[in-house]
Image (cartoon, rainbow, N blue to C red):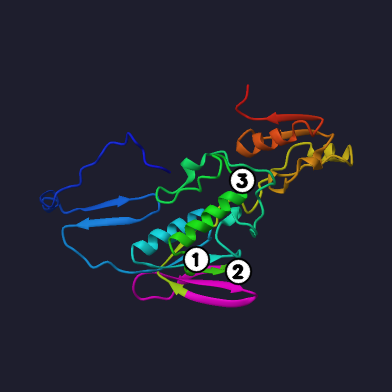
Amino acid sequence: RGPRPHARARTAPSPQDLARHDTTVCMCSAAAAVLSVATTSAPRLSRRVAVIGGGSAGVVTARFLKRAGHDATIFEAGSTVGGVWADNPTNDVVYRGLHTNLPTVVMQSPDLDFASSVPSYITKEMLGQYIEAYGREFGLLQLATFGATVTRVAPAASEGAPRWTVEWTVDDVAHSDVFDAVVVATGHYNKPYMPSLPGEENWLAGDAARRITHSLHYDDPDDFRGQSVLVVGGRSSGVDIARMLYGVAEWVYVLEKKCT
């Protein structure tokens, strides 16, 4: 997010203040970079960190790990960074015609603007290109292992600080390595949640044309042309899909639990 123009300034404690207290002061950024200030100085340690997932969260995390002096490796199943916004994602959950529901000035990094030619609300392709540009700008693409499917993460045998064994495959060839820490940035759109509804079996059996599907599998409003559609859920994707169905489906209903 961009800087907050009305945020109140904070004054850092002086060395004298710290000397009067046996304490450690930590300041945490959104990218999980931590700066520790203590009464006794200690050398900064460089850690080997596995970042699982090369979407927006993964590349931002890797950037700040790198800036803090750590040795980060991004494991991305696709052919480039971007996650679900990439050109050829391994998890194709973004439906055709989607535009972001946040403007670019809110989504962009404070030190990397979107191109001036793009509109405020952009397509999947535009956002994927921005994330890839972010990776190039901050030297993150060379940290990535593409086509990597992580199959296992487990504690490694270690006498000192805890370490982690990460196993992955690339082109069906198995690999493994040991890391000091693991960041899981795989997102939460892999598996759709479809609860069993009372009476749904009888309803489906009443007409062969009836079906229940999840927004994960939605892509084109023409698949519902001339039909009566009930969209369950009135959040971002529900409202967006209902808008696309309007004028294509015969009837569109939106069921939102907070509506009265």
Disc 3 designates what residue?
Answer: 123
Marked residue nearer the N-terminal end (1 or 3) = 3
Q: Position of residue 172 (x, y in %)?
A: 65, 75
Label 3: how many Cα within 10 Å (few below 14, some 14–19, many 20+): some
The answer to which of 171 and 135 lies nearer the viewer is 135
**Horizontal side of residue 243 vs 19, given as left or right:** right
State the extent of the magenta-drawn residues as a range. Answer: 152-177
Disc 1 designates what residue?
Answer: 141
Magenta-drawn stretch contains 126? no
> Which three-letter amino acid code belongs to the residue tagged 2?
Gly
Marked residue nearer the N-terminal end (2 or 3) = 3
Question: Which quadrant: the C terminus?
Answer: top right
> Which three-letter amino acid code belongs to the residue tagged 1?
Leu
The answer to which of 239 and 134 lies nearer the viewer is 134
Element class at badge 1: helix
- Which tag is nearer the camera, tag 1 or tag 2? 1
**Alpha-carbon distance for marks 1 and 2?**
13 Å
Up-down: is 240 above or below 126? Answer: above
Residue found at x 52% / y 76%: 176
Q: Position of residue 33 (x, y in %)?
A: 35, 56
Disc 2 designates what residue?
Answer: 147
> Which three-letter amino acid code belongs to the residue tagged 3?
Thr
Residue found at x 65% / y 43%: 98
Marked residue nearer the N-terminal end (1 or 2) = 1
Question: Which quadrant: the N terminus?
Answer: top left
Q: Position of residue 192 (x, y in %)?
A: 66, 49
